Image (cartoon, grey):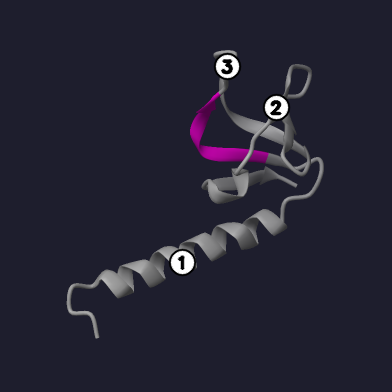
Amino acid sequence: RDSSGYAAEWRAQCRARLDRLEAARQVRPGDTVRFARPITFSNGDVEDTFRFEKRNTFRIPGLARYTITGWRERSFEIVTA
């Protein structure tokens, strides 16, 4: 056993990642998703709440469409389904 706790920490990080990926499977087109931390885009926009369209595509209703790569790795909540 690793007395430094490194192995336990690594396993906890793996479990947390798997939990995020499982949560991402629950997101359906039309769901509103709020990320734990705002995302800054190359055009200077900073947003945290989007409507999911498909794959990596999100929209702010009535406004812009954004591609968010790696969104499944971020902490988020489904605000409305």
Q: Amino acid at mark 2?
A: Tyr
Compute the Cα span from label 3 to label 1.
31 Å
Q: Residue at x 66, y 54 (%)?
A: 24
Q: Secondary structure at mark 2?
A: strand
Quadrant of the rendered image containing residue 2? bottom left
Q: Give the label on residue 66, or none.
A: 2
Q: Residues within 10 Å of mark 1 (few under 14, many from 20)?
A: few
Q: Are marks 2 and 3 in contact (CB under 8 Å)?
A: yes
**39 relative to 78 in the view: left or right:** left
Whether the residues at callouts 1 and 2 have beta carbons within 8 Å, the answer is no
| Residue 28 percent coordinates (x, y) | 78, 49
Instruction: Give the percent coordinates (x, y) of residue 12.
Output: 39, 68
Q: Kindly state the secondary structure of the residue where label 3 is placed.
A: loop
What is the distance, in whole Å, between disc 2 and disc 3 at their CAs?
10 Å
Magenta segment: does it hold 49? no
Q: Residue furthest top?
A: 43
- The answer to whether 36 appears left or right of 13 in the picture is right
Are the two marked residues, 3 and 1, in contact with CB atoms closer than 8 angstroms? no
- Compared to residue 61, the image places residue 3 above or below, namely below
First of labels 3, 1 by sequence position: 1
Q: Main secondary structure of the magenta part?
A: strand
Q: Which-is-in-front pick, marks 3 and 1?
A: 1
Identify which residue is drawn at 57% across, 18% down: 42
Per the image, the residue denoted by label 3 is 45
What residue is pinned by disc 1? Answer: 14
Q: What's the residue type where badge 3 is placed?
A: Asp
Residue 72 at x, y = what percent?
61, 49
Q: Which residues are magenta?
A: 33-40
